[in-house]
Amino acid sequence: MSWTQHLILAPILLPMVVAGLMLVIDGRSGRTTAALGVFSTFALLFIAIVLLVQASAGGAQSAVQVYQIGNWPSRLGIVLALDRLSAMMLALTALLATAAMVFSLARWHKAGSFFHPLFQVLLVGLNGAFLTGDLFNLFVFFEIMLAASYGLALHGSGHARVKAGLHYIAVNLVASSAFLIGVSLIYGATGSLNMADIASRIGDLDAHGAMLFRVGAAVLGVAFLVKAAIWPLGFWLPTTYAAAGPPVAAMFAIMTKVGVYAILRLGLLFSPDGQSNVLAASGLLLTGGVITIIYGMLGMLASQAMARLAGFSVLVSSGTLLAVMGAGNANVFSATLYYLVSSTLAIAAFFMLIELAERGRARADDVLAVTLEAYGIVYDEDSEDSREAGAAVPAILAILGIAFMACALLLSGLPPLSGFIAKFAMLDALLDQARNGPAPGSAWAAWLLVATLVVSGLATLIAMMRAGIRTFWPSFEREAPRVSMIELGPVLVLLALCVGLTIQAGPAMRFVRHTTEQLAERKLYMDAVLKKPVVAPQASAAEASASPAGVPGAQAPVTPPPKPPPPKKEASR
Amino acid sequence: MEPVIAIAIGVLTGSGVWLVLRPRTFQVIVGLSLISYAVNLFIFSMGRLRVGAPTFTGSAGGANALADPVPQALVLTAIVISFAMTALLLVVTIASRGLTGSDHVDGREDGL
């Protein structure tokens, strides 16, 4: 095996090793940990891009890369699988992580202890959740991600954070219990934890087993929907995200997307053959998603503080994803994925931008402060807010204003940025379905969703405009916030990426279309995982691939393979 | 054996859910612990209940005489994770108690 085949391990191993190293050399502070963190995130970005290139080689027929940890056959051991969707999510995570990491270096990483190790562990969890091909490891990586996120949500401490964090942790612990119940029910029904193996066994279940499986899938779905913050399960989100520190909130922007990712991955993998979209079958995702959009929209209009507004915009984004996934046929999915990337980048940029724009303002505006107080929003007057960092950038208000405008355009889906293209593509696909849809029910659903999407765009625009006017055109004198380049840079880079997505919309759309084609072709994923031969000991890669004799049968007695050579250390560099 | 396990899981879950919905942080923590016990038992029962059966060796009667080892491994992982999470929640609760002076989950009493 060449080193590129081991590279799939790196997104999990590298941050894990780095986090451990940080703890060994005292992760509380210091330039060394910061340098390690920066090194790790930039290396991850590089690795993610290499993996993205690997996974997307070959256009629509690109292969699914499978890595069997410990060289156990796929049915017995733990596998990692890299297809276009996971590669895309990995790259998105790495991009956000790089931006958030650089942003935090200005001062946020000093707001409390252990920012850098927690950040790396969060990356372990995120990357693992995107790569794993195994249901129970999905749970483990979810937990790793959540454990780190609990710490990060509380980073900087303060009353609001601890209170929001308590609710966040309690809700997610209950959701984790639901996750476990779902996983064990599915295991009880199918006798396997490997996603591809489960998918291959669904067809053979008897009536009793099928019922167990469906219940398990439903409970599992509830757990993912809590993560994705669908309407009745997502009340924890705005408060937590608004209370979290900006770089942390920017990273959290992808955490709701992990829930969406899991629903998409498992939903498509577990759907019976010949039925393109099992997610639309019950209409539950559509209904929940639409209500989430409406709830998020009303929340945005009612928000006094910008951070809360951003929190509700996360709800709108994930509601849109869920509703469109639950309404559409497979054609709509590609537009959804494009929207996922664009909205995640925009929300992350928005969270970081808020802190810059509000700097030096919150306490100047007494009237507003009273309003905020009346709504129970308490600003932390911690020391972290009074320490300004770096030299001021000239004409900062103008730059921040333009960046804010870009965020508003992206979130509300107005031209000319990528938010518009995403929304346009979704509306186009939905209208197409409404006109030529097979069932009258789906047409009705499509129209409902189109209306909700358009109205939510308008509401977002109103809310953003109001917040923008209040911040950038205040009636009182305000001093320009002191913002250093390393804080402004990440925001601008994320927004520039959205501009890039707009200009390169053609290739980007082609990529997501191939991704959905690959997802719809679930046989591809299953074969890649299940038919992957174990690497023969002492044999060169050429021999191993030439003799696929190591493929174990379903019930065949499998002798434990000899210990394979350990993965080369260079792979994690 | 099945009814006993089923009732145990049911009672644990029921009490756990009730406690999680209570306003005091201590009750929430105990409730979450009870739910995690129930879940652990549930995972265990998903490997089918067998009394006195070995997991790996000494199987005279073939695969059917063996207890399923996978749920046992899963339970072990789940116990560790839920244990760690409970500890973490305790820390947060203590922090909340220190900051607000109240052990209400909202950080303030209802009447205030």
Image: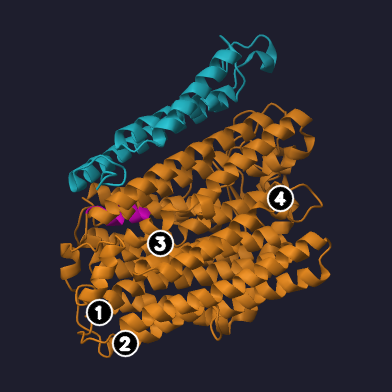
Chain colours: A orange, B cyan
Q: Secondary structure at mark 4?
A: loop
Sequence order check, earlier mark of 4 and 3: 3
CA distance for labels 2 and 4: 47 Å
Residue A483, labelled with which disc?
1
Sequence order check, earlier mark of 1 and 3: 3
Residue at 65% of width from left, 72% of height from top?
Answer: A451
Q: Secondary structure at mark 3?
A: helix
Chain letter behind tag 1: A
Crowding around mark 3 (Cα neighbors within 10 Å: few <14, some 14 to 19, many 20+) is many
Q: Is residue B55 magenta?
A: no
Question: Looking at the image, which residue sits at the far front?
Answer: B111
CA distance for labels 2 and 1: 18 Å
Q: Which residue is mark 3?
A: A251
Residue stretch rendered in magenta on the structure: A113-120
Q: Is residue A308 left or right of residue A500?
A: left
Same chain assignment for discs 1 and 4: yes
Chain letter behind tag 4: A
Q: Which residue is mark 2?
A: A473
Give the camera-side residue of A62 and A458.
A458
Q: Examine the image and state in which quarter residue A371 appears.
A: bottom left
Sequence order check, earlier mark of 2 and 1: 2
Q: Which residue is mark 4?
A: A282
Q: Secondary structure at mark 1?
A: loop
The quadrant the N terminus of chain B occupies is: top right
Sequence order check, earlier mark of 1 and 4: 4
CA distance for labels 1 and 4: 49 Å
Crowding around mark 2 (Cα neighbors within 10 Å: few <14, some 14 to 19, many 20+) is few
| Residue A573 locus on image (x, y percent) | 41, 58
Judged by depth in the image, the label closer to the viewer, 2 or 1, is 2
CA distance for labels 4 and 3: 32 Å
Judged by depth in the image, the label closer to the viewer, 4 or 3, is 4
Q: Amino acid at mark 4?
A: Ser
